Image (tube, grey):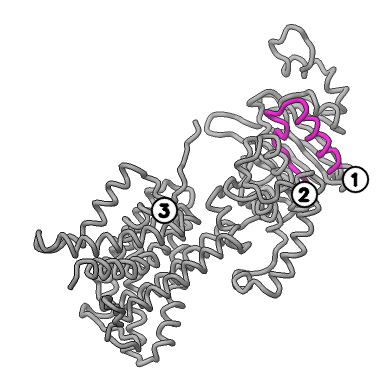
Amino acid sequence: MSAQLEIREVSKAFGGVQAVTRVSLDVPRGEMLSVIGPNGAGKTTLLNMVNGFYHPNSGRIVLDGVDITEHHPSAIATLGVARTFQNIALFRGMTVLDNLMLGRHVHMKAGVLSSFVYWGLAQKEEVAHRKRVEDLIDFLKIQDLRRRPTGSLPYGLQKRVELGRALALDPKILLLDEPMGGMNQEEKEDMARFILDVNEEWGTTIALIEHDMGVVMDISDRVAVLDMGQKIAEGKPDEVRSNPAVIRAYLGEKRDGSAR
Amino acid sequence: MLDWQFSLLLLSNGVLIGLMYALIALGFVLVYKATDAINFAQGEFVMIAGFVVVAFLLSYKAPLWLSVVCGLAAMIAFGFGLERAVLRKLIGRPVIAVVMATIGLAAVLRGIGPLTWGADTKNLALPISDEPFVLGPLFIPPIQIVGAVVSLAFLAGFGWFFLKSRKGIAMRAVADSQQVAMAMGINVERYFALAWAMTGVVSALGGVVWGSLLGVDVHLALVGFKVFPVVILGGLDSIPGAIVGGLIVGIVENVAAGYVDPYVGGGTKDFAPYVLMILALMIRPYGIFGKRIIERI
């Protein structure tokens, strides 16, 4: 079976800095893949290439048989790739509801004129999209936050709303950039559960990035490890955990030898 | 005339003129809100719109409504075209590039206007009388009422658009972060084009109301300069700010003209708003309603 997302030998350099070097990764449909690695390993660069923010210097990226290497980010989003950001990138002045509704944008067909007129097509669309968003609000248990401006929410909830906004695209593939970064243990476990539920209930393919090995090891089908822009290991969480190259690269100078 | 009556007259005049400033400032705010570009050619947009409407009205003897519709269409096309031909290529460049492009554009338009349509002042007559309404102590020229009503209608319309409509909210998202908007599947360039087209609409209406108040010639572009105190006072990215800033500038220049001119021999109307602008920049540089930008390092 061919993978839903194929990353073939991609490289990306910024000036003299080689951020990603000939990395290949296949992500089968419905898989929950984690890409881990120390800070500066090239994880976010890889993600940015998949969603089109960067174009690789060499290599190809193929989604469902379509070469998206040179596609524009908005085109890639339309093809079903949604993402979240390492530093929360919600539209802060807007309410939770408006943020989630923006996630429906790719599915909205009403044009400018009809949205000025509002009634008719746009109105009918609005109702359908609103229903989908309400489902997500229930799923993420943020019912009481609908009308709150996102900037006023606590950090963990902002991360959850951002996940919701990405889910509102009804993506085929969800890219999560450090979804648990900066969270306390309880928030991390909540987030891990939501991510697992998305993967299991809707079969959404998920590729997530973390530099913290902890939680992701428990929830991932497969783990790939990047270090200094290169893929140094790939496999089941247990295989990766015991891989000497990973221990060396990942834990580096740590003396006690235990994974955090 | 009693003193309070004189004050009231200056005030009402200031409010009506202020709303007409707000209309032009709205064009500026629309572009800044969506694209972060500062349009130094806003006054020239208004001037060109005035020229186009007058050309249809006088040269082709078209009825007024048709001339206005043609003016609107021309300015929408102009906004779209400008974005596509010039500004899209500047996306991602430093802000100064866009600023220079619009300053250059302003100079070109000030040349093209009189070159194409002649340098004489043309009369853009609306089918309303010149007789002022007399409301107790107030004398209100009908053109100012028309201008104020048109301004309020459009300010309310665009306010609704940004607050409630999906396209407007998407446009705010684009303004907030182009990158994130792209990741949501929003075609950023299309919204840039839309913003410039909307500025075209506002400029066309500004051209009609200001053109009929001042006459249409190259000096019509000068109303664009008043946009700067308006948006600095109100906030570069705020529609309510455009209204409040417009009102303040309108009132201040009229009151200054009424009370200070007799002592200094005139001219205070033209610089009073800028004094206020400089004060505002020192005290509250992001304006009354503007977003306070906090840079995180």
- Residues B59 and B152: in front is B152
Relative image position of residue A231 (x, y in whole percent): 74, 28
Range shown magenta: A172-199
Q: Secondary structure at mark 3?
A: loop
Picture disc at residue B236: 3
Determine the CA span between mark 3 and mark 1: 54 Å
In this rendering, the answer to whether B196 lies above or below B125 is: above
Q: Is residue A192 magenta?
A: yes
Q: Is residue B201 magenta?
A: no
Q: Nearer the viewer, mark 3 or mark 1?
A: 3
Number of other residues with Cα within 10 Å of mark 2, as a class: few under 14, some 14 to 19, many 20 or more: many
Determine the CA span between mark 1 and mark 2: 35 Å
Q: Are both tags, 3 and 1, on one chain? A: no
Q: Are both tags, 3 and 2, on one chain? A: no
Relative image position of residue A244 (x, y in whole percent): 80, 15
Using the image, name the chain to which the residue with label 1 belongs. Answer: A
Q: Are both tags, 1 and 2, on one chain? A: yes
Q: Secondary structure at mark 1?
A: loop
Callout 1 amino acid = Met
In this rendering, the answer to whether B33 lies above or below B125 is: above
Using the image, name the chain to which the residue with label 3 belongs. Answer: B
Picture disc at residue A1: 1
Ranked by sequence position, the earlier of labels 1 and 2 is 1
Residue designated by label 2:
A137
In the displayed structure image, the side of residue A165 where residue A195 appears, left or right: right
Using the image, name the chain to which the residue with label 2 belongs. Answer: A
Callout 3 amino acid = Leu
Q: Nearer the viewer, mark 1 or mark 2?
A: 2
